[in-house]
Amino acid sequence: MLVGYMRVSSDTDRQTTDLQRDALLDVGVDPRHLFTDRASGARDNRPGLHQALAYVHAGDCLVVWKLDRLGRSLPHLLQIITTLQAQGVAFRSVTEQMDTTTPQGAFLFSVFGALAQYERALTQERVRAGLAAAKRRGKRGGRPRAISDEQWTTIATALEQGMSKAAVCRTFGIKRATLYDTLARGGSAVQGAP
C-alpha cells in the first residue's frame, strides 16, 4: 500500500498542498492514505508525520513529493528512512525519483548516508580544531563560571564568618545549586576559589 505525506511551511491559506496532493495521487496513493502537516520542516512536532509513520506497516511504501517535505536536514531524513527500512517499509520521493525498492534508489540512499557521515566527521573535526586553537590562546572551553573569583572571595569570607548558605544565596543573588556546585569543586569555603 502507498501512504503519502505532504507538508507546507505555513498554516495560512497562502500555501496549499494541491501540487503535492496531485503528484501523490498520480503515482497511485489513495486519498484516504494521505497525511498532512502545515508547519515548518524545522519543527519536531509534526502530527501528520507522526501519524503517517505510525500508519505504515511492513510491505508499505511512504511516498513524498520532494525529500525536503519529509526531513528537516539530511541526518534527520536519513534517520526517518533508516527507521522505515528497519520496519520493512519502502520510501519513495516523486520529484527526485528516489525509490528504495529499486537498486538505484538503494544506492542513492547509501550515498546520502555516506555524505551525512562525512558531514558529521567534518563538524567534529572543526570543533576539535577550534577547541585546540582556543586552548593555545589560553582560553577555556565550556560554560563561563557563574561565580567570579572576586565574588567567590567575598562569599568564602562570609561563610567563614558564619553566614548561612541560604543567606549567602539571597545576599549575592546566586542559586543554591550554583553555590553547592562551586563548594564541591573548590573543596570547602576555607580553601578559597575553585
Image (cartoon, rainbow, N blue to C red):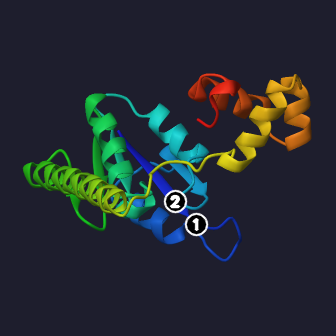
Question: Relative to 108, is 73 on the left or the right?
Answer: right
Kindly identify which residue carries mark 2: 41
Q: Residues within 10 Å of mark 1 (few under 14, many from 20)?
A: some
Residue at coordinates 78% horizontally, 37% vertically from top-left?
155
Foreground residue among 107 and 55 = 107
CA gap, disc 2 and disc 1:
7 Å
Of marks 2 and 1, which one's residue comes earlier in the chain? Answer: 1
Question: Relative to 182, is 80 on the left or the right?
Answer: left
Q: Residues within 10 Å of mark 2 (few under 14, many from 20)?
A: some
Answer yes or no: do the residues labelled 2 and 1 have beta carbons within 8 Å? yes
Return the x and y of residue 150 as percentages of the image width and height. Answer: 71, 49
Return the x and y of residue 125 as percentages of the image width and height. Answer: 24, 56
Q: Quadrant of residue 165?
A: top right
Return the x and y of residue 40 as percentages of the image width and height. Answer: 57, 62
The amino acid type of the residue labelled 1 equals Ser
Q: Secondary structure at mark 1?
A: loop
Residue at coordinates 40% horizontally, 51% vertically from top-left?
29
Q: Quadrant of residue 159?
A: top right
Query: Can residue 65 be seen at all in this image of the molecule?
Result: no
Foreground residue among 11 and 189 = 189
Residue at coordinates 86% horizontally, 43% vertically from top-left?
173
Q: Secondary structure at mark 2?
A: loop
Return the x and y of residue 81 as percentages of the image width and height. Answer: 31, 43
Kindly identify which residue carries mark 1: 9
Looking at the image, the residue that sits furthest to the bottom is 14
Question: Relative to 149, is 8 on the left or the right?
Answer: left
Residue 163 vertical placement versus 153 (above, below): above
